[in-house]
Image (cartoon, rainbow, N blue to C red):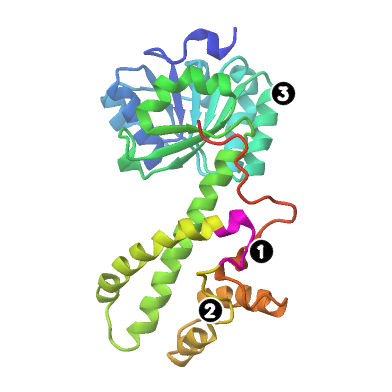
Amino acid sequence: MSATTRNPAGPGGVTVLGLGAMGSALAAALLDTGRTVTVWNRTPGRAEELVARGARAAGSVREAVAASPVVVACLLRYPSVQETLGPVAGELRGRTLVNLTTTTPNESRALAAWAAGHGIDHLDGAVMAVPAMIGSREGQIFYSGSRAAYDALLPVLGVWATSEFHGEDAGRASLVDLAMLSGMYQMFTGFLHGAAMVASLGVSASDFAARQVPFLSAMTHGLADYAKVVDGGDYTVPGQQSLDFSDLSHIVRASEEQGVDPTPIAAVQELIARQIAAGHGSEGFPRIYESMRAAGSTAGSDEGGAA
């Protein structure tokens, strides 16, 4: 009997493997809805609070997997998923595995192939939320893989956050997640680089943030315009700041003059310089996308997008 025919979305039958901050939040949210939750963690003692709230602590991974038709893995990295699930592949057969461990797209695909080879229904998820957001509509979790598993589990998935299905390519949710995180971390790095620059004048990071936050917020409105240019593939459309005008070497020099590592802004300058050297200096700043995109990729394609 497959996992989807056992009514996994019902009030019972969810096991959570991994009780870090996120795994614990996922288990707690399920307990709040009255579901039967079995939990397991490699390090003993992590389950005590959840047990006090009604969870059942399993003594082993094998026992935890056997307890429920739906098994949620929220572990540290892909190797820990392999190490944890490999020995219990037999017990997982016929069940639904929801992987919420952060993995690369190819790692997610490898896990999906492994699951398929062992008769396991697999759904891969990418959590766009901090633990405190679990149990509300503020966070998002992207899913890809088995559409049947996604549809059957929607009542469970909806307990945690807003759910989006991104297609049957198991690696798609991971790729979208990591691409969004790339933008976030580079924004954070840019802020910290700027804070390091003005710190040489005695300006505190807090004072700098008070100026930077509204400025960055205003600048994000330009992302949609950049996206239209990239999707259109024409970097000569009017109204753009040219690459020649966007030369950032003066920011690199200013950083160096203040004794600050220019690596973050120097990386952007390298992308600009590459396009200028190729003869595109008069074209718009979004042209640097061409320095980064994968060969053969098609801008604007949204095959298997959110549903």
Magenta span contains residue 70: no
* Residue topped by disc 3: 117
Residue at point 48%, 22% (across, down): 64
Answer left or right for 46 relative to 283: left
* Residue on which disc 2 sits: 246
* Mark 1 residue element: helix
Which of the pair 18/266 is nearer the observer? 266
Q: Earlier in the sequence, mark 1 or mark 2?
A: 2
Which stretch appears magenta?
A: 229-237
Looking at marks 1 and 3 on the same chain, the residue that comes earlier in the sequence is marked by 3
Between 31 and 185, which is closer to the camera in this rendering? 185
- Label 2, secondary structure: give it: loop
**Number of the front mark, 2 or 3:** 2
Vertical placement of 265 versus 32: above or below? below
- Type of amino acid under label 2: Ser
Q: Which residue is mark 1?
A: 290
Q: Quadrant of residue 106?
A: top right
Which of the labelled discs sits on residue 189, or is there none? none
Helix, strand or loop at disc 3? helix
Identify whether 217 is placed above or below 101. Answer: below
